[in-house]
Amino acid sequence: MTDTITLPAGFEDLTELAAHWARATENARSAIRWSASAQDFAAFYAAFMPRLRAALDLLEQVPLEEMDEAQNNLFELACAFAEAAPHHELYGGSADVPHSFSARRFVPGHGDTASRL
């Protein structure tokens, strides 16, 4: 990610969220998620959930290989939201999954590969 986060027109108000949550790889997003508090999850959810449909509608129009930087940042933010939302909706804001083994034990083979190739 660059120092200046750009997002598509109409999503500029989510720049601060993108700067914090959007990362290119699953491992990088997981590190942010594991360190998040219940307040972090709630704030992310409250800000992005109402915009999710609009974000997905915009991203659906652009093939992955043709995304510009702003669209890619929105894609990475949407990926982070998909991974963080259950922590708000289902896990009471916990960064851990209740009644489960530690997610840190799961090491995806593709975890350091960018979600968008």
Image (spheres, grey):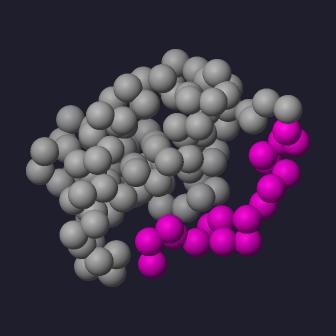
Decide if residue 89 is in sight here: yes
Q: Nearer the viewer, residue 83 or 111?
A: 83
Identify the image quadrant of the N terminus. Answer: bottom left
Identify the image quadrant of the C terminus. Answer: bottom left
x, y percent for residue 71? 26, 61
**Residue 115 placement, left or right of 2:** right
x, y percent for residue 99? 85, 32
Q: Identify which residue is drawn at 66% across, 71% down.
A: 110
Q: Identify which residue is drawn at 62% across, 67% down.
A: 112
- The prevailing secondary structure element of the residues shown in magenta is loop
Query: How many marks are shown on the rendered structure?
Result: 0
| Depicted 75 relative to depicted 67: above or below | above
The quadrant holding residue 74 is bottom left
What residue range appears in magenta? 100-117
**Residue 94 placement, left or right of 53:** right
**Residue 14 placement, left or right of 27:** left
Decide if residue 36 is in sight here: no
Tell me, yes or no, whether the highlighted magenta stretch contains residue 31.
Answer: no
Q: Identify which residue is drawn at 18% across, 54% down.
A: 8
Most extreme residue toward the left is 9
| Depicted 20 relative to depicted 62: above or below | above
Q: Nearer the viewer, residue 8 or 20?
A: 8
x, y percent for residue 96? 74, 33
x, y percent for residue 2? 34, 56
Tell me, yes or no, whether the highlighted magenta stretch contains residue 116.
Answer: yes
Q: Identify which residue is drawn at 59% across, 37% down.
A: 86
